[in-house]
Amino acid sequence: MDVLWTDHGEDRRSAGEMRMTMKMPISIRQESPRGHSAIKAINDLAFKQVNEGLLIEKLRGTPDFIPGLSLVAEFEQGVIGHILFYPVKIADHGKKFITLALGPMCVHPDHQRKGVGTKLVHEGLKRAKGLGYRSVIVVEHPEYYPRFGFKEASRFEIRAPFEVPDNAFCAIELVRGELKNKSGVVEYPQPYLDAV
Ligand SMILES: CC(C)(COP(=O)(O)OP(=O)(O)OC[C@H]1O[C@@H](n2cnc3c(N)ncnc32)[C@H](O)[C@@H]1OP(=O)(O)O)[C@@H](O)C(=O)NCCC(=O)NCCS
């Protein structure tokens, strides 16, 4: 039996039934308080550790957290994926500007490689732009994020405050040219740094 987490608890289904649900449309929506435990559960499963779920819980408790940019992918009221965008500053010679950090994001292992992550990224970037954000940065998975238009952040002279391979620290402009004349080091809030 597989487990589908819902806002109301666990929903146990057979693998066959779970595959059937993949034919159903996936909806992307803002997280709701009742879905917090589901988000933690699928992060723990997808990452095979508790760090990312705990990170999300810590960030949710900060004033900068944006509920509208913590999105879940759901089928039949079951949460199968999650993506978070969190505002961070980039400091350049005393000047600071805001960007969004993408992550953590995850898809339930039973539903990976079926396009759920792609939907979450596309919808997240769209909503971020709609809320007035102009760029997004992301760490890790150099083979995944470029398909959405992310490029090495070094091209924009944006650097991480920790060691990371060049191709695993990327950025995307939501507004063309936004990063053109900007540069600097990203200032992550402590919960992110603790999770690195
Ligand atoms: C990374 C992740 C979110 C992708 O979600 P997904 O729904 O499986 O991805 P999609 O179905 O939209 O995209 C599938 C494509 O991404 C690729 N892909 C999936 N995970 C990948 C990874 N870790 N690195 C590189 N490519 C990856 C697949 O090869 C596939 O490529 P293809 O379309 O050329 O066949 C999901 O695999 C996951 O939860 N992984 C564990 C947690 C994690 O690493 N999160 C990201 C870091 S914050």
Image: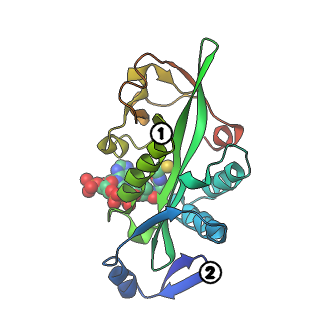
> Where ligand 1 lies, by quadrant?
bottom left
Identity of the residue furthest to the top in this view: 93
Considering depth in this image, is 29 or 138 the residue closer to the camera? 29
| SS at mark 2 in the image | strand
Tell me the residue at 45%/41% (across/down).
140
Tell me the residue at 59%/39% (across/down).
87
Q: Disc 1 vs disc 2: Cβ atoms closer than 8 Å?
A: no
Q: For disc 2, does the CB lie below 8 Å from ligand 1?
A: no
Q: Which residue is mark 2?
A: 9
Task: Report x, y in % for residue 57.
Answer: 69, 56
Q: Eyeballing the image, is 195 above or below 15?
A: above
Point out the image quarter for the C terminus. top right
Task: Report x, y in % for residue 188.
Answer: 63, 34
Q: Based on the displayed image, in which of its 4 quarters is residue 111 positioned?
A: bottom left
Q: For disc 1, does the CB lie below 8 Å from ligand 1?
A: yes
Tell me the residue at 40%/82% (across/down).
18
Check disc 1: other Cα within 10 Å, few if <14, some if 14-19, many if 20+. Answer: many
Tell me the residue at 54%/51% (across/down).
69
Q: Eyeballing the image, is 124 above or below 188?
A: below
Q: Can you tell which mark lies on residue 170?
A: none
Check disc 2: other Cα within 10 Å, few if <14, some if 14-19, many if 20+. Answer: some
Q: Eyeballing the image, is 66 above or below 34?
A: above
Q: Based on the displayed image, in which of its 4 quarters is residue 191 positioned?
A: top right
Task: Report x, y in % for residue 148.
Answer: 33, 44
Considering depth in this image, is 14 or 116 the residue closer to the camera? 116
| SS at mark 1 in the image | strand
Q: Eyeballing the image, is 30 above or below 65?
A: below
Q: Amino acid at mark 2?
A: Gly
Counting residues from the start of the chain, the first of labels 1 and 2 encountered is 2
Q: Which residue is mark 1?
A: 138
